[in-house]
Image: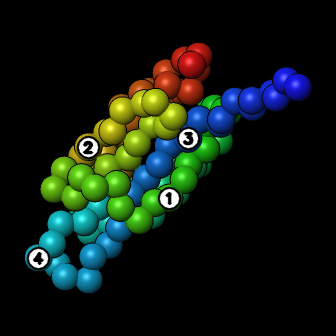
Amino acid sequence: MRVSMGTEMKKVIVCINHRANPAQPSCGARGGGEELAERLEKEIEAKGLNIRVERFSCLGFCKDGPVLKLSPGGRFVCEATPDKLEELLQEIECFSRHSD
């Protein structure tokens, strides 16, 4: 019997962690998080890219945040602040069009 494996949809995983202790670094407290995820969703939709935005509570790079991950198989992008939106979108667009 042959099993067909579907292709996983590409996604941008955005860390939205916002720690209660301000002495500990977190992506949400550095201008990433929810604001970045919402702006990416709007721009990705406007550009008609076949990639979705997913929120995640921690990607493990708190000192280098805000952080996002291009998935599957893409890289982590550190210091991904909303003021770098155009640069981020260029990389996301390239990733979304690259075949696995």
Residue type, mark 4 in image: Ala
Q: Is residue 61 left or right of residue 59?
A: left
Residue 32: percent from the left, percent from the top? 34, 58
Q: CA distance from mark 3 to mark 1?
A: 10 Å
Identify residue for label 4.
Answer: 23
Residue type, mark 2 in image: Cys
Residue 20: percent from the left, percent from the top? 26, 83
Q: Are marks 2 and 1 in contact (CB under 8 Å)?
A: no
Q: Is residue 70 left or right of residue 43?
A: left
**Image point (49%, 37%), residue name:** 71
| Nearer the observer, 58 or 94 | 58
Identify residue for label 2.
Answer: 78
Q: In the current view of this chain or complex, which residue is farthest to the left?
A: 23
Residue 16 in which image quadrant? bottom left
Residue type, mark 1 in image: Arg
Q: Which mark is residue 11?
A: 3
User: Of label 2 and label 4, which has the lower sequence position?
Assistant: 4
Q: CA distance from mark 2 to mark 1?
A: 15 Å
Q: Is residue 76 left or right of residue 65?
A: right
Q: In the current view of this chain or complex, which residue is farthest to the front?
A: 1
